Amino acid sequence: MGKHYGLDALTLHELRIDVDKEWADEAGQPRGITNLKELASGMQKGDTFFRQGGVLVKLSPGSIGDELTSGGPGNAIQWKAPPGL
């Protein structure tokens, strides 16, 4: 198997990502997520992330039977019991 996308990694699991990098857009304004390293180190089985206000927020698994719900644009997602239960 050859190299991926011109990188030195032979396989995807060998790919190293600098999670502490501070990215900037064309105008030099900060861009990106800065707390990725901290979130990744604290992950447990079943955790996922969502973006809220420019940062990643960890969402742990809900209770059995809960549904992932949204309060609409700009609101955080959350686990809730299905309607009628």
Image (cartoon, rainbow, N blue to C red):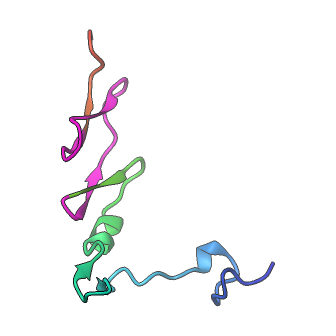
In what quadrant of the picture does the N terminus appear? bottom right
Q: Is residue 56 above or below residue 21?
A: above
The residue nearer to you, when weighing 57 against 38, is 57
Report the label total.
0
Q: Is residue 78 above or below residue 50?
A: above
Q: Position of residue 45 (x, y in %)?
A: 42, 50
In what quadrant of the picture does the C terminus appear? top left
Part of the protein shown in magenta: 53-77
Residue drawn where x is 33% and y is 86% of the image: 21
Residue drawn where x is 31% and y is 35% of the image: 62
Q: Is residue 66 above or below residue 73?
A: above
Residue drawn where x is 25% and y is 71% of the image: 35
Residue found at the far top of this picture: 84
**Prevailing secondary structure class for the magenta stretch in the rendered image:** loop
The quadrant holding residue 72 is: top left
Residue 12 part of the magenta segment: no
Q: Position of residue 20 (x, y in %)?
A: 32, 84
Residue drawn where x is 37% and y is 23% of the image: 65
